[in-house]
Amino acid sequence: MSYANALREEELKNKVAADFFKDYDSTKIIGNVDFCIAKITDKSGGKQKLLFDESAMTQSLLWAEAKRGKRQNIYESFVQLIMTIGKARTFEKYLPPVFLGAFDAEKIAFIQYNIISPVFTQNDFDWTVTSSNHETKEFRQLYETVKEELERKSQIFYFDKDEKELRKFIKSNFVLGRQGHSNIVITKNNFVTVYFKWLQDVKPSIKIDWEKAKQLGILDADFYLADLLSKDNESIKDSLFVLLKRNQYFMFRKEEDELGLRDPTLVEFNDNQRAHRRFWSIYDRPPRREFWNYIVERRDLLVPQDVRERKGSFFTPQKWVELSQKYLADVLGENWQDEYYVWDCCAGTGNLLNGLTNKYNIWASTLDKADVDVMKDRVKNGANLLSSHIFQMDFLNDDFAEKCPKGLLDILKDEKSVKNW
């Protein structure tokens, strides 16, 4: 959904109210504020009643600035709204809203009122200037004062691509009496959808040559996982190939040096992290802990199809895992796990090895170092594997003597061990 660029401001306000706030009262006029939303709480008897009466102490959920057209500077619209409220001291005549907002024909943004409210206590600011004139000294001064908070904490939704998220945000947060606000929760059911939105909004702001990175086996999915599995802009799973550290990423080498270390490469944003902050402001990070392993193990869903086909990176469903073990038992006997060695040479994240019992006879290798890290992280969380039996290898092209761990190499060289091959 989007609106025509030529819509007049009044018509735009009516359409936004009808399309997104039909369950609320949008008829209130609060001082010189363009757009006001209050909650309708009682629809009994076929009549709608406002929780608050018609007095000046009406409680609102949103005060917003509206602008016709598209590509308006949303932060300047916020500043104009702040100046309008400050000039008329509207917050002294009416109970302040939960949110301040700004919108035009392509987008709408929200910020909690209490984040901005301290600015109204400034004693050395001239609130008498015209708020619609964006060129005054006072306007630019106020813009610089609140710009950082607006960029960091406002939540922006585009009517066309973010319609679903916007409706969820309004439903969750436009509730009288709610303390704070609720973001969109990421689960194992929607993390892929969020990833595709991340590709559009965040990926272009990361300062890296993606084609060269792709040739090195570094994928945008690794950056997305670093973002997703983070708290306060700090990745919380150390085994990830890429880690987010506040306002930059650390990308680790795929190969360890002679000391067993992987020196990190610093990757920065090309827009001072503005797109990143704007995108993640509407989502809860990290997802619930119970989803972490699932999301990392299903990294294959975040890998472009051409890369998946080239690497053979396909997820193995659990029912196939169980069926494979049944077939092996049928052919090799019920004690096969103790009598044979298992080497999954294209293990991915190790799904095919789920349920095996003799970890001393299991080896796992894969082409992608990030998948090796995932398997080793699973060992730390109780997977029945040995970390020393997990390694990176391209078994079609690499030298076995160079890449295989000594224990596996000894088995491969032992005639007795391979007599039944």
Image (cartoon, rainbow, N blue to C red):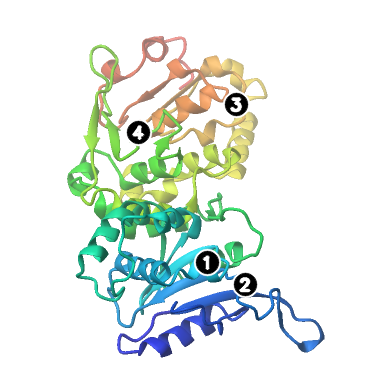
Residue 10 horizontal/vertical position (percent): 41, 89
Q: Secondary structure at mark 4?
A: loop
Local packing at callout 1 (Cα closer than 10 Å; few below 14, some 14-19, many 20+) is few
Number of on-image labels: 4
Quarter of the rendering containing residue 338: top right
Residue flagged by tag 1: what amino acid is it?
Glu
Residue in the image at 58% along x and 16% along y:
339
| Quadrant location of the C terminus in the rendered image | top left
Q: Amino acid at mark 2?
A: Met
The mark that comes first in sequence, 2 or 1, is 2
Residue nearest the viewer, comparing 377 with 225? 225
Q: CA distance from mark 4 to mark 3?
A: 27 Å
- In the picture of the structure, the residue carrying the numbered disc 2 is 57
For the residues carrying marks 1 and 4, which lies nearer the camera in this image? 1
Residue under numbered circle 4: 241
Q: Is residue 352 left or right of residue 149?
A: right
